[in-house]
Amino acid sequence: MLAKNIVLQGSNWRKLLSFEIIEEGGFQIGGFGLMAHAAPMYHQKLDDYLAFLDILGSAKEII
């Protein structure tokens, strides 16, 4: 799972990878992930541990 905008609560430490670059047949394909705070399966379970940063600000940092 890729998620640039998720950090541990109270820190800037990212628990998940921000992006990945795959090389295949001489081509490079890059992708990055972002997750909304409203993701239902994570919201209640991980709210005490994770902080969700601004999605647009996080995307601008990568691009």
Image (cartoon, rainbow, N blue to C red):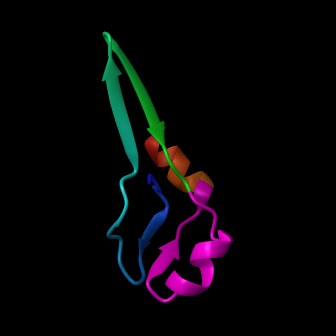
Residue 63 lies, with reference to residue 11, above or below; the image says above
Quadrant in which residue 54 is drawn: bottom right
Q: Please report the residue visible at 61 percent of the width from the left and 79 percent of the height from the top.
A: 43
Q: Which range of residues does the magenta coloring cover?
A: 35-55
Q: Position of residue 40 (x, y in %)?
A: 67, 73
Total labels: the figure holds 0
Q: Please report the residue visible at 65 percent of the width from the left and 68 percent of the height from the top.
A: 39
Side of 26 relative to 41 (left or right): left
Side of 33 relative to 30 (left or right): right
Residue 29 lies, with reference to residue 46, above or below; the image says above
Residue at the far front in the pictured view:
41
Q: Position of residue 49 (x, y in %)?
A: 43, 84
Residue at the far bottom in the pictured view:
48
Side of 32 relative to 21 (left or right): right
Q: Nearer the viewer, residue 39 or 61?
A: 39
Quadrant in which residue 16 is drawn: bottom left
Residue 58 lies, with reference to residue 10, above or below; the image says above
Magenta stretch contains residue 5: no
Magenta stretch contains residue 48: yes
Residue at the far top in the pictured view:
26
Q: Please report the residue visible at 57 percent of the width from the left and 75 percent of the height from the top.
A: 42
Q: Please report the residue visible at 35 percent of the width from the left and 32 percent of the height from the top.
A: 21
Residue 31 lies, with reference to residue 58, above or below; the image says above
Quadrant in which residue 52 is drawn: bottom right
Q: Position of residue 17 (x, y in %)?
A: 36, 54
Quarter of the image for the N terminus: give it: bottom left
